[in-house]
Each structure stands twice: as C-alpha cells, then as structure tokens.
C-alpha cells in the first residue's frame, strides 16, 4: 500500500481508458501474474452503465448515502451513476489519465490521489470499494493499516461497501474437497502486472478475501462486517460499519 500515484509511462490501465474515451475503442489490456496464465480486461467494461453493472455493484450504489467516496474510480462509471441518482460523490484514482477522463465525462469531483496518502484526510459517510475493492489492500498483513486509515476517512456511523471474491474454487477437487497448502501464503494474495500496447506497469499486490477472513479482521480493528449480498460465483458484497 504505497501512497503513490502513477506516471503515464507506468499506467497501462489509464492509457487504455484514455484511448477508449478518445477513439471509442481500445486494444488489449493484458494482465500477467506469476500464479495464472495471461488474461485480458475488456476495456469497454470499464465504461459500463448502471444497467450493465453486476447486481452487487448496483446494490452498493443504491445503498450508498450521504457524502460518498468512490475509490479506484477508473473511468468514473460508478461516480456518474451516483450523480445520476442525485448523490454527492468524490471519485479518486492513482491514475492521472483516468482522472482526466473522469473529468471530461462529467464527474464533478475527480481527483488524482492515493487513498493511503497521509495528507489525504477528508471524511465521508460512505466509502465505495468496488470491482474487487479489497484488491487495493494488497495483502492480509496490511489489514490493520487499512482499517486504521478507514477510521480517518469515515464520519461517525459511516460504512464501507466492498466487494470481493473467495478464490477457494480454484483449489476445488472433483470430489468437492479443497486442496490448499496451509503453510503457504493466503490463497487470495495475487501478484499482477498490466500492459497496454507499449505501456508496461510495475508488479503490484492484489487481495481477494473470503468473507469470513474479512469479518475476522474487521472485528479485530473496530468494525462490524455484514454480508449484504452474494453473487453467482463465490463473489459477495460486504458492508463494514465503524463500531
């Protein structure tokens, strides 16, 4: 969780978002990992409308209230949907290119800032962390620092709506049992690197966390976790309320 923003030559997702906004199409946003085969993110999905969003995201946007912070806002699809609902939202991202696109698309409050920057201290009633929002935590060992930072950003009675996935299905055997090395790192800790055309990003940590583990760390750090909605494939939306 380094409190930095991305320079353009290290910002493949921002480059893809800017390309798509300018041209109405984009090339492959390639995703690499030491744990998985190469994959890609369809850039058009980063521009989806409310009606095109998964049910978990729609639920989170409906539940968000008061002053709202949209973390890792990308092209601004969630922020724009919230504005259409008449809600007050601030959108932040570590990608200057993405923030510029958000501003051009009409997001009223879009800023290039890292959530974990010690100088960023604004308070909100609702914090949204969607599209596997737990990812920016990076590793389980960062949970304490994450919740500590969230306490700085939440008003009394405030909450976080976060979605994530339980990757245990990747280790499921044919008989329904799970084959995991209990001595290894937590199975939801993934490393990624992205590339768009000639723009190559650095390797970064990304966390997928099962709800039980998330709830444990929430309780340990002064929050109460509630399972709001489950998706179709081991994904879920959680509400983390400041106790």
Image (cartoon, rainbow, N blue to C red):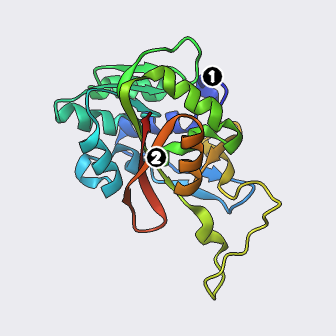
Residue under numbered circle 1: 3
Horizontal and vertical percent position of residue 117: 58, 18
Label 2 CA crowd tier, 10 Å (few <14, some 14–19, many 20+): many
Horizontal and vertical percent position of residue 68: 33, 28
- Location of residue 165 with respect to 112 vertically, above or below: below
Q: Is residue 193 left or right of residue 158?
A: right
Q: Quadrant of the N terminus?
A: top right
Label 1 CA crowd tier, 10 Å (few <14, some 14–19, many 20+): few
Horizontal and vertical percent position of residue 127: 40, 32
Q: Is residue 104 left or right of residue 240?
A: left
Residue 132 visible in the displayed image: yes
Residue 37 position by quadrant? bottom right
Q: Quadrant of the C terminus?
A: top left
Residue 114 position by quadrant? top right
Secondary structure category for the residue under label 1: loop
Horizontal and vertical percent position of residue 73: 42, 34
Residue 210 position by quadrant? bottom right
Q: Earlier in the sequence, mark 1 or mark 2?
A: 1
Count the labels in the image.
2
Residue 94 visible in the displayed image: no
């Amino acid at each position: 969780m380094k409190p930095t923003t991305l320079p353009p030559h290290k910002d493949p997702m921002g480059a893809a978002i800017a390309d798509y906004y300018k041209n109405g199409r984009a090339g492959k946003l390639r995703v690499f990992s030491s744990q998985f085969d190469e994959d890609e993110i369809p850039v058009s999905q980063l521009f989806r409308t409310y009606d095109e969003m998964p049910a978990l995201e729609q639920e989170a946007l409906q539940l968000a209230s008061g002053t709202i912070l949209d973390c890792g806002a990308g092209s601004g699809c969630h922020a724009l949907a919230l504005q259409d609902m008449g809600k007050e939202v601030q959108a932040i991202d570590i990608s200057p290119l993405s923030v510029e696109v958000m501003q051009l698309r009409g997001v009223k409050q879009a800023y290039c800032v890292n959530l974990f920057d010690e100088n960023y201290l604004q308070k909100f009633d609702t914090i949204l962390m969607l599209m596997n929002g737990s990812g920016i935590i990076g590793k389980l060992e960062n949970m304490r620092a994450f919740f500590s930072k969230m306490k700085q950003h939440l008003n009394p009675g405030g909450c976080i709506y976060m979605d994530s996935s339980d990757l245990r299905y990747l280790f499921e055997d044919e008989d329904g049992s799970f084959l995991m090395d209990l001595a290894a790192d937590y199975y939801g800790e993934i490393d990624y690197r992205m590339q768009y055309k000639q723009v190559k990003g650095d390797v970064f940590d990304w966390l997928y966390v099962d709800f039980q583990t998330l709830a444990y760390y929430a309780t340990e750090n002064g929050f109460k976790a509630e399972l709001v909605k489950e998706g179709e494939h081991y994904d879920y939306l959680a509400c983390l309320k400041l106790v």
